[in-house]
Image (cartoon, grey):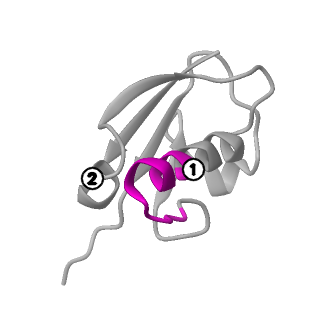
Amino acid sequence: MRITIKAFGPEITSLLERERIVIVEPGSSADDLVRRLEEEIITEHGRTVSILGSSFTVLINGRNLEILEDRSLEDGDMVTILSPIGGG
């Protein structure tokens, strides 16, 4: 299955491409995909980054993953990862 990943914000785009297509096995969950990305970050950058359960926001087709829980991905889904934004 083809999944589009988009990354926004300085922290995550320094670790992942801004946009790319990945191929995942049928039945893969969003959690599976994010764990795969975390492993890639460790391999390529030597950094441990926790995307799930951290200050990053993960969306599937514009809906927050926390609301969707651990849903299976479908061909053509778009997974967006947003870095935390600070301000004051």
Tell whether 13 sits left or right of 47: left
Q: Is residue 69 toward the left or the right of residue 58 in the image?
A: right
> What residue would you read off at disc 2?
14
> How far, Cα to Cα, is label 2 from label 1?
15 Å
Q: Residue farthest to the left? A: 88
Which numbered marker is on residue 51? none
* Residue situated furthest bottom in the rendering: 88
Residue at the image point whose x is 61% and y is 43% from the top: 36
**Which SS does the magenta portion mostly show?**
helix
The residues colored magenta run 38-50
Secondary structure of the residue carrying tag 1 is helix
Residue type at the position of mark 1: Glu
Q: Position of residue 79 (x, y in %)?
A: 51, 36
> On the rendered structure, is 25 left or right of 51?
right
Identify the residue shown where x is 34% and y is 51%: 15
Dot 2 lies on which element? loop
Which residue position is annotated with label 1?
Answer: 39
Please name whichever residue, 32 or 57, is drawn nearer the observer in this view of the structure: 32
Total numbered labels: 2
Instruction: Please tell me whether residue 33 is drawn above or below residue 20 in the rendered image.
Output: below
Vertical arrangement, residue 30 with respect to residue 23, above or below: below
Neighbor class of circle 1 (other Cα within 10 Å; few <14, some 14-19, many 20+) is some
What amino acid is labelled 2 in the image?
Ser
- Kindly identify the residue that appears in the image at 48 percent across and 57 percent down: 57
Q: Is residue 19 magenta?
A: no
Relative placement, left or right, of 6 versus 4 is left
